[in-house]
Image (cartoon, grey):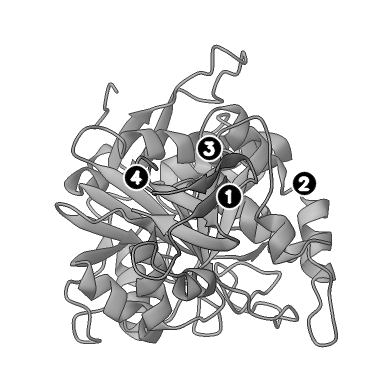
Amino acid sequence: MRLQCGLSIAMLAVTVTMMAQANVYFTKDISAESLQKVYEALGVPTTGRVAVKISTGESQNSNQLKPSLIQAFVNGVDGTLVDCNTTYSGSRSTTASHRQVIQQRGYTVAGGFKYELDLMDSDGADSAAGELELPMSADTQNGVAPHFPYAVVGAHMANYDFMINLAHFKGHQMGGFGGVLKNQSIGMSARRGKALIHSAGRNAVSERWFSYADDQDGFLESMAEVANAIHQYFHQEGKNIIYIDVMNNISVDCDCNGRPAQPVMKDVGILASTDPVALDQACLDFVNMPSSAGDNHQPLLDRIARQHGTHIIDHAERIGLGSRSYTLIDLADLDDMHSAKTELPQSYNIFRIDGTPVGTNLKSLKGLSEGLYIINGKKVAIK
């Protein structure tokens, strides 16, 4: 079916470019409760039928997000877990074998989820019955044309009104790293769509995908372009999409690796945003923070550099998917905020979060638009 349509947290929080700045919400606590909390911080309630895109992982040894972490959240938003079959030969390359994996991992009603996981291309993993074609938009302002005209995603995507891209941030053998951009592009593509991404549009036969995997930048750019097509699809009227990265068990290897290297970088936390570019950039900025005893970032940094992994972020920003500029908002800071109505004095010195003055010795907070401010030296959320 084809549709025609070396940084500290404080330093991270003041990243500035000429593009609009997104909010990225962060909590260092990796728990079911904090996953719910970081979702609520976005202020974007789910509507209609909700899909939650995860990776089911290649083996029990892989580092995919575990049911114990995500189940309460997924059930709470009345969500259905979704994934697609892989194009490489493995435990998830056919619908039958992938369903066995799903049972083994516990992503099932019997395992406590409200709905069974939906394999979005299961109506025909290598046929039109299992596919939905989304138009890839060209960026005429920057003169960027997509590598191929249509993203080929799982057909069941059309059944959902709201998408939660729930990604496990980690390294990746081919992409350098994998976050929400990879989870949305390769992860939501049908097998033919995956072959197109890996070949930068030169091949659509899934069994031949590796024979054309010789254009690294084209591969990364194709991932960004497909992620953008899906993002645009879910920004039609009546639809929406949000993004969450979980930075735990951060191996240099992807969850598509059945025998991943042991993580040597410590867990970071959970991050969320409505901007996928800002979100993956924030995760990369945490990776770029200095290593310390028992917390070695260098192997992942080396892999990202070797695969030119940051190019996906650059290209995604270039084609308008989002901005690398962001404000990092630590939920611990929000918990410590004082109520503007009950705890602040009656004279206010107000600055925007970037330090721009709003006013001094003001007698009222009336007229302030929603957002974060520094009021009398404290961070305050006005709603």
Residue kind at label 3, given as amino acid type: Gly
Q: Of discs 1 and 4, which sits in the foreground?
A: 4
Secondary element at tag 4 = loop
Image quadrant where one finds the N terminus? top left
Residue kind at label 4, given as amino acid type: Lys
Q: Which of marks 1 and 3 is nearer the N terminus?
A: 3
Rounded to the nearest angstrom, the CA distance separating label 1 from label 3 is: 20 Å
Rendering quarter of residue 251: bottom right
Q: Mark 1 points at which residue?
A: 353
Q: Position of residue 209 (x, y in %)?
A: 57, 45
Q: Which of marks 1 and 4 is nearer the N terminus?
A: 1
Q: Mark 3 points at which residue?
A: 322
Q: Dot 1, crowdedness within 10 Å: few (<14), some or many (≥20)?
A: some
Residue kind at label 1, given as amino acid type: Ile
Rounded to the nearest angstrom, the CA distance separating label 1 from label 4 is: 18 Å
Q: Which residue is drawn at 69% across and 65% down?
A: 9
Rounded to the nearest angstrom, the CA distance separating label 4 from label 2 is: 48 Å
Q: Name the residue under label 4.
A: 366
Q: Of discs 2 and 3, which sits in the foreground?
A: 3
